[in-house]
Image (spheres, rainbow, N blue to C red):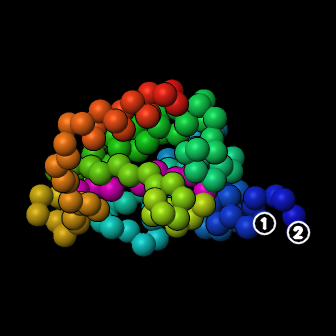
Amino acid sequence: MSTDPTDRCLFCAVATGDVPAHTVFEDEHTLAFLDINPAADGHTLVIPKAHADDLLDVDADTASTVMRSVRTVARIIDRALAPDGLTVMQANRRAGWQDVFHLHVHVVPRHDGDALTPPWTPQSVEPESLSAVATRLRGMA
């Protein structure tokens, strides 16, 4: 079996033009196109053209380049569609809700009263619990 990610990756095929997409923005390293199953009109995906499975698989320069394009796309959506707000979401791995295993960032225009709901319910925790988790995280920095 080939190790070329374009043989198995839908978004690599979009990036090479082998699969058609409704492009919103493109530069040398990134591509932004409309989601074919949108949460709202204008829901756009931003990807690096070079394959990376997720945020944990990409180098810092590519991550920065993708985020610059996310900002550009957010501004395009804001000017063109005048939403009341925007939700930017990026998921990693199956348990993190990733469904296409090529790094991508969702930029979703939002309108007051739309049908979209937050993916979790905030809950209170004890300060000691936060302190313990912060200590573990700092130990890995």
Residue where numbered disc 2 is placed: 1
Q: Quadrant of the N terminus?
A: bottom right
Q: Are marks 1 and 2 in contact (CB under 8 Å)?
A: yes
Q: Nearer the viewer, residue 74 or 7?
A: 7
Can you say whether 73 is above or below 43 in the image?
A: above
| Image spot of residue 129 (x, y percent) | 27, 41
- Magenta region: which residues? 102-110
Q: Which residue is drawn at the image coordinates 49% and 28% (left, top)?
A: 139
Label 1, secondary structure: give it: helix
Q: Nearer the viewer, residue 120 or 14?
A: 120
Residue where numbered disc 1 is placed: 7
| Image spot of residue 36 (x, y percent) | 46, 71
Name the amino acid type tagged 1. Answer: Asp
Toward the bottom, the furthest residue is 37
Please indicate, yes or no, whether residue 47 appears anywhere in the rendered image.
yes
Q: CA distance from mark 1 to mark 2?
A: 9 Å
For the stretch drawn in magenta, what is the main secondary structure?
A: strand
Among the two numbered marks 1 and 2 on one chain, the one whose residue lies closer to the N terminus: 2
